[in-house]
């Protein structure tokens, strides 16, 4: 792995050919940066020097993904938000190569001097020793077992996981000490770990939700360029359900005027595949994500851009983002209520959420550390 990149970055305009397969259209400066840097027209710069560069010299390098090591001393994050139904979580990665344009986690990259845009998708931080650190935390005498949520910020099964295998090693530790876990992902790669998840599910220790934003492969390709296709996500639901893993669907995020028309179809497809619980969230556009999203709309859905943003404001009390507790996940106003009614009615018609898998915390046994048994 490479070392963590320096704090100061030059943010340049990114040509479509260079960012092919990425979600963001640019790389704006972070909100904590004192100055914004812009690279000007290179031909103009060269002309000022009295010469003109060849076209090949001006061709930008491919926009590659880099992974830096995150040497955090703790992997379990505690949460006390009234909007979130879990107390602790693990994020094996910072940044996410899926490149979902609407991702509310994008602003977290600004704390590292990076951008909410292409930096978030291409400059990743991984925790290769997460399983070792987790084992140590679970073995602590004062540790109290609560369900650990994974995938609440960035996806634990994003493409780099196929090579690094951090998530699988985390699951191995959790399974070993009978610790319950809930997972949210957009990736078919979750089925790689069906052996561990099925074993944990038999002990009441695991459940998985697949996030399905759209069934339109073209829209998904533009909106979530490196996530699994909608069909592969539905297939993952089926594979997990057949293996006995409690599985659900998240229609998240619902974007008014863009994918809200698909609510019923997504729920029906997920039910047919074996999902038995369902949840939803309304799109959130915190900090720089709102401008990034508007740029994306202008490029990929110009005919609907103003309408989509108008509907979003209608669900956020006239604002483009509402960070208040109790409303930020579901929105407010008539349009948000209509979305809620459609979702609730469809869930009732199909049979969703009649029974929710309750994960068992009573089986937890502290793991061994460095070959020594943990003390009770």
Image: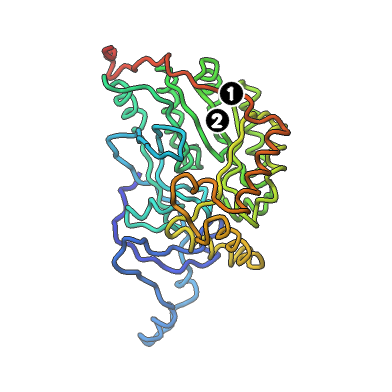
**In the rendered image, which residue does mark 2 sit on?**
208
Quarter of the C terminus within the rendering: top left
Q: Residue 136 appears at what percent x and percent y? A: 29, 25
Distance from the alpha carbon under mark 2 to that under mark 1: 7 Å
Mark 2 and mark 1 lie on one chain; the one further toward the N terminus is 2
Q: Quadrant of residue 78?
A: top left
**Relative to 267, is 151 on the left or the right?**
left
Q: Residue 57 appears at what percent x and percent y? A: 45, 72
Q: Quadrant of residue 146?
A: top left
Q: Residues within 10 Å of mark 1 (few under 14, many from 20)?
A: many
- For the residue pair 20 and 350, the one nearer the viewer reads as 350
Q: How many marks?
A: 2
Question: Do the CB atoms of the residues marked 2 and 1 lie less than 8 Å apart?
Answer: yes
- For the residue pair 128 and 297, the one nearer the viewer reads as 297
Residue plotted at (50% across, 75% down): 55
Residue 245 is tagged as 1
Residue plotted at (45% across, 42% down): 153
Q: Is residue 102 above or below residue 87?
A: below
Residue plotted at (60% across, 32% down): 248
Q: Residues within 10 Å of mark 2 (few under 14, many from 20)?
A: many
Q: Is residue 166 above or below residue 364?
A: below
């Amino acid at each position: 792995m490479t070392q963590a990149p320096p704090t100061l970055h030059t943010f340049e305009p990114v040509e479509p050919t260079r960012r092919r397969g990425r979600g963001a259209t640019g790389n704006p400066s972070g909100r904590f940066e004192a100055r914004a840097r812009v690279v000007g027209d290179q031909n103009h710069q060269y002309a000022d020097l009295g010469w003109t560069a060849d076209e090949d010299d001006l061709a930008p390098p491919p926009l590659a993904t880099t992974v830096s090591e995150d040497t955090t001393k703790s992997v379990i994050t505690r949460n006390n938000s009234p909007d979130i139904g879990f107390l602790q979580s693990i994020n094996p990665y910072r940044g996410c190569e899926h490149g979902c344009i609407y991702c509310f986690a994008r602003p977290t990259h600004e704390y590292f001097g990076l951008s909410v845009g292409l930096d978030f998708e291409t400059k990743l931080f991984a925790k290769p020793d997460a399983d070792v650190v987790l084992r140590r935390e679970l073995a602590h005498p004062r540790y109290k077992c609560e369900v650990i949520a994974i995938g609440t910020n960035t996806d634990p099964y994003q493409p780099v996981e196929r090579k690094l295998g951090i998530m699988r090693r985390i699951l191995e530790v959790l399974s070993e000490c009978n610790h319950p876990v809930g997972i949210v992902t957009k990736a078919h790669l979750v089925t790689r770990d069906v052996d561990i998840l099925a074993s944990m599910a038999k002990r009441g220790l695991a459940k998985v939700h697949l996030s399905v934003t759209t069934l339109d492969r073209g829209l998904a390709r533009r909106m979530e360029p490196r996530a699994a296709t909608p069909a592969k996500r539905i297939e993952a639901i089926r594979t997990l359900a057949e293996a006995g893993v409690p599985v659900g669907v998240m229609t998240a995020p619902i974007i008014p005027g863009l994918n809200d028309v698909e609510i019923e179809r997504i729920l029906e497809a997920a039910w047919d595949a074996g999902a038995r619980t369902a949840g939803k969230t309304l799109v959130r556009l915190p900090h720089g994500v709102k401008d990034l999203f508007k740029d994306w709309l202008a490029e990929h859905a110009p005919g609907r851009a103003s309408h989509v943003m108008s509907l979003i404001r209608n669900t956020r009390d006239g604002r483009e983002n509402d960070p208040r507790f109790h409303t930020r996940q579901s929105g407010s106003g008539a349009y948000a209520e209509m979305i809620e009614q459609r979702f609730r009615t469809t869930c009732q018609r199909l049979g969703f959420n009649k029974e929710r898998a309750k994960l068992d915390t009573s089986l937890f046994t502290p793991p061994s550390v460095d070959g020594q048994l943990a003390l009770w």
